[in-house]
Image (cartoon, rainbow, N blue to C red):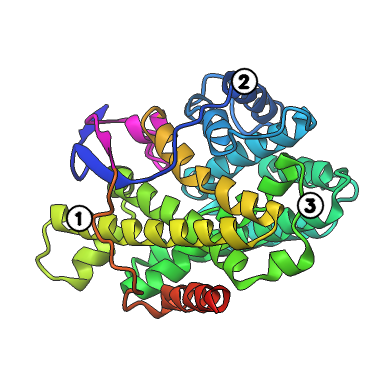
Amino acid sequence: MSSLSPAIDKLPFYCPIPKAPHPSAGTLDAESVRWMVDHGICTPDSWIAQINSGHVAAMMVPLAESSRPAQHMSLFSDFCYWAYAWDDSHDARLDLRPPGALTSHCLRLDRILDYPGPPPHESDPYCQSLWDLRRRLADLPDTDQAIRVTDGTRRYIHGSYQWTRMQRSRTIPNLNGYLLARSDDCAGSWMVPFYPLIGGYRLTPEEAADPLTLILNDLVPLIGALDNDVISHHREAAIGEFNVLDVLRNENSGYPLTDAVTDAIALRDRLMTLYVRIRDHLARTAGPHLARFAHDIGYIIRGHMEWALETSRYRTPQDAKTGELHDATAFTVEWSDHPSDDNPGPPDLPAIAWWWDHIRAAETKTAT
């Protein structure tokens, strides 16, 4: 086992969202591991079965209604494990390393999402398990929410495919291009629609199409993705991949890694400030369901970070190509009460700068 060092050992994050553990975390995790084993994704003693992905599912949705069917949280937890396992499978499986093979594989997954009919006639565990997830979505009484989860899963698969191609070509984009690609790859597109589903409420078509809702759908997962980039840089470096820290260093020749960490955290803090601004605006002006949605999805950020502090996915990451385990030096999170960058205006990044235009317009409208 080789040793890795993270970018810094203490990470200051602005996150004004309280920790809220879910009482069923252990049960969810055990059931999801059993589901993966039953579908042939892994064995009980494999590394992926030890990363406590059921815990992140529970911590990201800690306020689930106790009256809701247990299968809603179980489905979300299984989705989390499927996504992490599938993400690692791109490089772990020799048969998926050729570009044409990965293309064909993603097309098969896409077709399964289109049609939850009979199980696919193939032995690929990811196709079989995705069919099971899609079937369970189709059985839900809330058809609109199920469609949103399905469409979000499709976006994630397409984004992950493009992300893998970019990583394999070692084409490091500029920061603006990176944020666009990262938004599609970070799994938020299927996570976010689960919140009304699990919470037992629904957004109206008008609320779902509101510009601020659409912004939250990407903003919150992107904050979590940048958090992930900082804490998992040692993991990506071990397997020859790059993330936002490398993008920043590439744009600023000779940049020390610690400076890249500082800039990445400043960007995520600025985004967190925007999230709080939109959340609080909707709490004052929106209906109860949209206001609750805007509040609850913030746990994607806090729940992911709490999980990152415990999971072997970052504490003892595995090289997907070689199977080698790496012992990462311990790191801690310092929860800050104030953002390191509190600039209320947009950054010079066209991919996300327009988000600030919509919250300013909404605030102006309600003030008149």
Residue 344 location in percent, x, y? Answer: 33, 69
Q: Which residue is mark 1?
A: 262
Q: CA distance from mark 3 to mark 1?
A: 39 Å
Kindly identify the amino acid type of the residue bearing the numbered disc 1: Thr
Q: Secondary structure at mark 1?
A: helix
Please state the extent of the stretch shown in magenta in the rendering: 312-336
Q: Is any part of residue 45 visible from this angle?
A: yes
x then y, percent, for residue 104: 66, 61
Q: Residue at x 39, y 27 (%)?
A: 310
Counting residues from the N terminus, which is met first, the one under dot 2 or under dot 1?
A: 2
Could you tell me the amino acid type at mark 3?
A: Ala
- Kindly report the distance in space between the C-alpha atoms of the residues bearing marks 3 and 2: 24 Å
Examine the image and state in which quarter residue 208 appears.
bottom right
The foreground one among 103 and 279 is 279
Question: What is the x, y in percent for residue 214?
Answer: 60, 67
Give the residue displayed 45% in from the left and 61% down from the top.
277
Dot 3 or dot 2, earlier in sequence: 2
Please rate how many residues cluster around mark 3, counting C-alpha atoms within 10 Å: few if below 14, some from 14 to 19, many from 20. many
Q: Which residue is mark 3?
A: 146
